[in-house]
Image (spheres, rainbow, N blue to C red):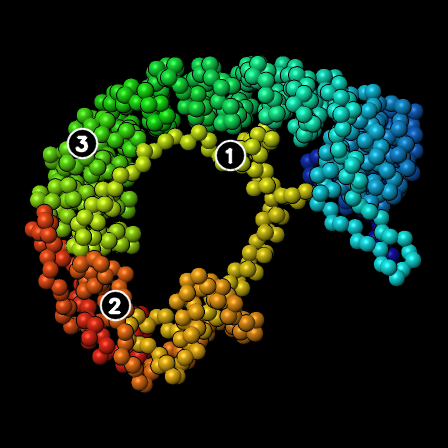
Amino acid sequence: MAMAPPRKGENYELRQQLNSEYRDKRADAIKRVIANHTIGKDCSGLFPDVVKNMQTDDLEQKKLVYLYLMNYAKTQPELVILAVNTFVKDTADPNPLVRALAIRTMSILRAEKILDYLASPLSRCLKDENPYVRKTAALCVAKVFDLKPELCVEYGFVETLRDLIGDGNPMVVANAVAALADIYEASQNLPPTPPASPGRSSSPPPSSKPNSELFIIDPPTLTKLLVALNECSEWGRIAILNTLARYKALDEKESEHICERVMPQFQHVNAAVVLGAVKVIMIHMKAVTREDLIKSLTRKMAPPLVTLISSPPEVQWVALRNINLLLQKRPDILANEMRVFFCKYNDPPYVKVEKLDIMVRLASEKNVDTLLGELKEYASEVDVDFVRKAVRAVGQVAIKIDEAAERCVSVLMELIETRVSYVVQEAVIVIKDIFRKYPHSYEGIIPTLCSNLEELDEPEAKASLIWIIGEYAEKIENADELLGTFLETFKEESYPVQLQTLTAIVKLFLKKPDESQAIVQRVLQAATKDCDSADVRDRAYIYWRLLSSDPAAAKSVVLAIRPPISLPQTTVPPAILEELLSEVSSLASVYHKPAATFIGKGRLGAEEMQRRALEPEEDNAREKALQTVVAGQQAENLLDFDSDDIEPTSANSSSQNQSLSMFGNSSSASGHVGAGISSATLSNVAKSSNPLDELMDLFSTASMTTPQNQPQPIAPQSAFSGIQGLQDSTPSLNNDNTAPTRQQQQPHDAFAGLTGLSSPPQTLGSGSTSPNPPQQQQKQGGGGAQDDLLGLF
């Protein structure tokens, strides 16, 4: 026996009022129910009582009841059937507003049981005499297709939508176009219809995909869209413009016709309509070859874009992002509108940054003086980030326009004279890029840069000045002193500064070998012994070996001529740029990323798509990990670094053959590794649940056992055999105290006086151990893989 509802409380009072015999009390009770639902109270228990009030002539009360049904249809799907009769009755009401309201609400309820009763009223409303009902029913078809595609195909709703494109009312045409676009997008993700079984005589299952020919725009349809474009509302115009953007013109004449008919939309007050029109013209301009028409379109495109700059900041930023994209394709659109993008004092930071980027794109020899004066003013603002970007923009203009480089350098020197720390540091970074673009052109400013050495405290600024000193070390008298100041704090500096200091001092040594022997020895010792960065240590070892073996090779590597840098014309690849231009006035053009990178396909959201994308990646990652473990088990002892631990040919010939096939022939190595692993081996490895067991299995294979009889090893061919002094200077990984043997050949020419550079440090660690000669390494080969592993760990 079901429990009776409580006889007190707010819901009890509302239930009594909803069932009152007085119309005013019922209307007031419905308003209170909607108000309670709005503030988050659960009113689902009043569902039967609210449904009773659907049958009323009061349009306001009917709207409130429909609103209640839309919110609680998902939680009460069984009770929604109670309202079906009233819905069907309302779709035949004399009032067109009631008919449209009923058919709209039925399609929004998203309940499977309602859809079966919706087909007949929807067919009737699609052919209703009132255009308001027809345009409402057109959008309902797209909602029904989202829930049950086969229903739309069975009743021919998509064909009816296609017929509505020829309707006399422009709003009906626009809604039909929008609905067809949504249906087409949704139908692309539907699975193909399974064929009927040959052994059964039953009818084949209903198809859920509509005929693809219904979505093709032919010339008569194009004419109807262009006629309706100037007469429908903003939303309708946006839908038609998006359809025109996807339309592929048959020839040049048709493209010109589309551009001419769309051009009046530039004067619309809505920014989305303006950007939509710009998108259509940018797409169809590709097929236009008449120069006069292209210039006319380009000239008429500028005023509406300039008008968007005076919009509120949020709309203005969206317009600026789209303008930035358009300028990458056609920079001449706003070539004469530089002043429009000057920053105002009350512009938000995100708008200022976009304006700076656009001003650099519009910079030319004609307006560069005006632009530099404006950027110089920005450098005195209080916003540090904006000031940095303004200074960086000066450098970008110098790199972009060769004739203006000298004026840009003058502006940068004036900014350095202000002695403002962040301005000076950003100017040093920018001047480094200018030196890379114009080498040996502005060497006169180097003393001024060096005099501001104490002002630099940021890693990028320090690295930039160090690069300048190293690049022009032969022309700076006290270059060794300047670099010595950075060497004193070498351990405390960041890794980029350490790398740049190391390279600059090596450049100084190669240019002034007699004066910088001591400092290069100090930096190599510091980089190899005291630095904890593997990158810095590796570069130091490379420099040390180059200097000790072949100074000519060191010069060709360290002092190589670098190509001059240039300012990229686009921030996105050309293929992606074309895709983004077809998405102007959407999020893709704002993010400057294709829509597929941040939204899901069809009706799925981005989170769902990311989750689905991770599942196969996890499976692939697991299989790759298993293959790696199996390859380690099947390979030889790759951790045995002693060159004399070679397996006997008689005992392990198959292992040697496998090793030769994997490492000897580089053209087939990748194929043999993957092909030599069977599925049974993968399954055996997959059974190991403990990662430690897999590691122990890797080190306990038969191929790692120590051989009893070792043949005479063949000395490996060193990759650096052509470089003198390198074979005996390779660091050893064994903990032996045998003294190394050194070749007595000394460096030559100007490097003969450099002491201590005949070989790099002998160990990677504390320096207490020394490498073994090859002869003693051969004698100690009997230690086996286990001793070698213990020494390694």
* Quadrant in which the C terminus appears: bottom left
- Which residue is pictured at 28% across the width and 29% down the height? 438
- In which quadrant is the N terminus drawn? bottom right
**Disc 1, SS:** helix
Between circles 2 and 3, the one closer to the viewer is 2
Q: Quadrant of residue 343?
A: top left
Mark 1 is surrounded, within 10 Å at the Cα level, by few (under 14), some (14 to 19) or many (20 or more) other residues, namely few
Estimate the spatial distance between the alpha carbons at disc 1 and disc 2, rounded to whole Å.
50 Å
Of the two numbered discs 1 and 2 in the rendering, the one whose residue sits closer to the viewer? 1
Q: Are marks 2 and 3 in contact (CB under 8 Å)?
A: no
Q: Amino acid at mark 3?
A: Cys
For residue 257, side relative to residue 323 (left or right): right
Question: In terms of secondary structure, where does tag 2 sit?
Answer: loop
Give the camera-side residue of 531 and 592: 592
Percent across and percent down for residue 606 are 60, 44
- Where does residue 308 sit, x and y in percent of width and height? 55, 18
Which badge, 1 or 3, is on the more N-terminal residue?
3
Amino acid type at mark 1: Pro
Please tell me the numbered disc located at residue 574.
1
